Amino acid sequence: MKLAVLGKGPSLNNYSNLPKVDHYVIVNNFDQEVLQNEKLREDLSNTPVTHVANRNTLSMQGMVDNDMYGQLNIVEHVQPYVDEMKCSHGGCYCGNFQDGKFNDDKGNEVPTKILNPKHKNFMFKSGEQVGHPGNKYPYYYPSSGLAAIAYSVLELLPNYLYLVGFDFHEGGYAVGDSVERNTAPDSEKLGQKYMLSKLINSYTDMYFYLHTKADFEYEFENLIVNKIN
Ligand SMILES: [Zn+2]
């Protein structure tokens, strides 16, 4: 099975270099990226899509407002948390979760779930990355994007995994997005490359193709990096 995880970094503009895949994973608000790229919109409408989105209402608003759950072939919603990461409720859209379903209040409903407990073997423990906002949780991934990659690796188990749009916050975003720009603190950069390297190193039978504008210092036999200038 071939799978692609799409991030919001500027390397997403090289999306057309990706081969056709069997399944896509997108992260948080991805509506403007879809609306501004006809090929992307077509592929995400015709191929099954997993949507990973954190609990912040702002991370979901564009997806709902622009009817992405109606237009795209989203087959499941995944919350990038394990059971220990309780929500304190406030500015979240937890009210849209009921009986294992996510409902966008517009008549679209898909199954939703949290991460399998086996992710705890990979996640950072509280205090492990000094200055990271995730330290408020007993376990955390460095970002929703990395949680989406980890979910793909550990639970969707593709043979070939393509990553594009992951530039580790080093070059802004492919599409202007003031919300994310204002809410992604520098401290969230911490540990992202390290976490990706840990996943690649732990799943040696899986082939990873990383299209990125960032330098990725780690080398593995099952990793091909396509550095985009
Ligand atoms: Zn909540």
Image (tube, rainbow, N blue to C red):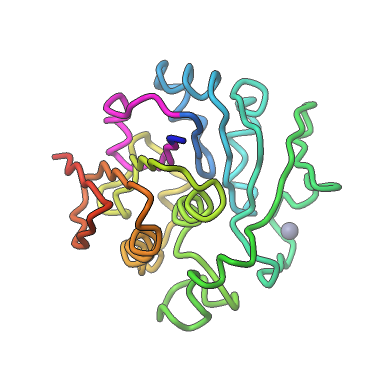
Give me the residue at 36% from left, 68% from top.
Answer: 191
- Please state which of residues 69 and 75 is positioned toward the viewer in this rendering: 75
Give me the residue at 59% from left, 66% from top.
Answer: 118
Q: Is residue 193 above or below residue 208?
A: below
Q: Is residue 175 above or below residue 123?
A: above
Q: Residue furthest right?
A: 99
Give me the residue at 36% from left, 62% from top.
Answer: 192
Q: Is residue 119 above or below residue 78?
A: below
**Quarter location, residue 187:** bottom left
- Please state which of residues 21 and 24 is positioned toward the viewer in this rendering: 21
Percent of width and height locating residue 113: 70, 51
- Please state which of residues 83 and 86 is positioned toward the viewer in this rendering: 83
Look at the image and tell me whether residue 184 can be seen. Answer: yes
Locate ligand 1 by image quadrant.
Answer: bottom right
- Image-based side of 179 in relation to 71, left or right: left
- Image-based side of 28 in relation to 93, left or right: left
Magenta residues span 3-21
- Image-based side of 82 in relation to 7, left or right: right
Percent of width and height locating residue 42: 48, 16
Percent of width and height locating residue 39: 40, 17
Q: Is residue 208 above or below residue 106?
A: below
Q: Is residue 64 magenta?
A: no
Percent of width and height locating residue 21: 43, 29
Look at the image and tell me whether residue 186 can be seen. Answer: no
